Image: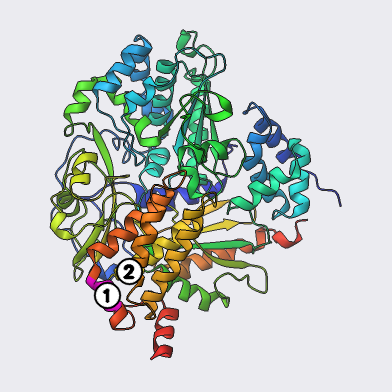
Amino acid sequence: MALQFSEEAEAEFQELLTRYPNTLAAMLPALFIAQREFGWVSVEVMDYVAERLDVHPTRVLNAATFYTMFNKQPVGKCHIQVCTTLTCAIRGAYELIDHLEEKLGVRLGETSADGHYTLTEAECLASCGTAPMFQVTYSDGEIEYFENLSPDRVDEVLEELNAKLKDLPNPREMH
Amino acid sequence: MTDEKPKEETQEVSEEEPTAEEPEKKPLPKPGAARAKAPKVAPKKEEKYLSRLFEVENGHDLDVYEKHGGYQALRKAMKMSGEEIIEEVKKSNLRGRGGAGFPCGIKWSFLPKESDVPKYLVINADEGEPGTFKDRYLMVLDPHRHIEGCIIAAWALGIRYCYIFVRGEMQFAIRRLEKAIKQCYEKGYLGKNILGSGFDFDIYVHPGAGAYICGEETGLIEGLEGKSGQPRMKPPFPAVVGVFQAPTIVNNVETISSIPFIIENGGEWFAEMGIEKNGGPKLYGLSGPIQRPGVYEAPSGITVGELLERYGGGMLPGHDLKAYIPGGSSCAVLTPDKLDAEMGFETMREAGSSMGTACITFMDTDTCMVRVAARLAHFYHHESCGQCTPCREGTGWAAKVLDQIEAGTGRREDLDLLLDMCDNIQGNTICALGDSIAIPVRSYIQVFTEEFEEHITRRGCWFPAWSRRQRQARSDAA
């Protein structure tokens, strides 16, 4: 099936192009739209973005593989990224990972079998004053920070996330 | 892009509660509630500038901002010439707030007056230096002050377009800024013929996508152009050849948010609120095992000890200070005997480190310095853009050697090897990321030599483990 932006995404994409003197500069925001639309950034998605921006496909490959926020493999509906850089590490980030691994039944770097959760670590998310923390990227493109976490608070957050799962698309099935 | 979704409400709670700075009223929630006790010393009430609206309800809204005197500095600036504004900024001793501390007025004066192509203002809001978390507060809680600063800078320098490069993870800050920008277009502060002056100016928010190196100004420019964020050789400096080959000024969020105060009260007033060569009020981020981590506003030149005790409330009960990093992880580490060091670029250099972003990370006596050095080496290895061999290879090599020392398989010659590596990385790379690994690793080894040597002689680490896996690995080894 040929990829195509939804009407809403298309409007956003067209507005984007008016912001820059050339189409190449729209690369990062365009890739964000594509990831939201198609779940993850496969080679097929990269080719589509290249075509839409009228740039060589290697340009897109270059950007998509350089920046960590673009998923070159599908992730779960909720992608939990625990910040483990200095302050968070000192304030208990690795204990959060221990706890999450147990609760979600996955190891760091894995996606749960039901496709609901992916657990990874992230480098500094600029929340050192509210450490430890994690970021959740939902498969609809929304991002949320959860700060000042403890294992008990993580349990509450997981309940909130569980309640959201039914409304989220599975990135694996989005294209 | 700015359409309201229900999510904004829920996120508002999680984003804003911990960020509002209310030291004397309500200590921030703590991960281990039992560890949090009443603050030792309540900070006295002081005049606030940068953080003035942080506690005001809907301070991010245009109406509220205007009620608090917002966009009056812009009106005043528009009666001044560009040269007059640059002169005030020079007088103010405003130093770049992103870490390098370059005098803002001098940077502005490098931008050519005449240009055949439109000139650009690029705001570096790619905040990601470990330990640093001040710019998010400014963008989320007071976006209009930042936008007003952008318009004044553009007016002074004859700039046509501005991009605010915000790290992509800070989606909430991006939406706040976009909403504020939309309000400005509706009110005539942005767009064509601003306030009837004939001056046209547009601001766009550009999302980063998870690369620390885009915090380096030329890496950021590459990212803005849609390429991988690999820094450029300088010269030419961005003021001459920047984004889209055009003259470009790259400033940090806090630098630009300070501009309206300089216009309102004059450069001399700003300079007086600080020490020699370091003017103005400043945001300080305090983190680590302390009573009240958070962002606080205080004058330039305040001592670290005063920040820790008066603002941060001191260390958590049962935790003793072992070391601190004054301004992000790329600064050299300092010990408690340097708590009287003043927060200024020159004064911190005299103390043996650098001020950096002025967001201080405190570490307690339970923290292993070998592990900290290793963790930071892994960070810089992960974030190295890969252009320069010393950085690309050196960061990973240093991380491996430090991991071995931590795990108990280090050799006596490893410390000299690490120091030699640092010497060969520093100064030999296109951008400062290489220096950012060499400086801290060297300083941890030099300041805590005995701790490093003891890891080698005792064949391992005796500090509390960070994770269960680490504890497991230790018991397996035993």
- Towards the viewer: B272 or A97: B272
Local crowd size for mark 1, using a 10 Å CA cut-off: few (<14), some (14–19), many (≥20): some
Q: Which residues are magenta?
A: B450-455
Observer-nearest of B36 and A27: A27
Name which quarter of the figure residue B292 lies in: bottom left
Lateral position of residue A7 relative to residue A98, left or right: right
Q: Chain of mark 2?
A: B
In the displayed structure, would residue B433 be above or below residue B459?
Answer: above
Judge by depth and name the residue closer to the eye, B462 or A71.
B462
Across and down, in percent, residue B99 comes to 34, 42
For marks 2 and 1, give the CA distance. Answer: 8 Å
Q: Is residue B52 above or below residue B240?
A: below
Earlier sequence position, callout 2 versus callout 1: 2
Above/below status of B399 relative to B324: below
| Residue B454 on the magenta span | yes
Mark 1 sits on what residue?
B453
Name the residue type under label 2.
Answer: Leu
Residue position for label 2: B415
**Can the viewer see residue B319?**
yes
Going 49% across and 47% down the picture, which residue do you hit? B213
Label 1 SS: helix
Q: Residues within 10 Å of mark 2 (few under 14, many from 20)?
A: many
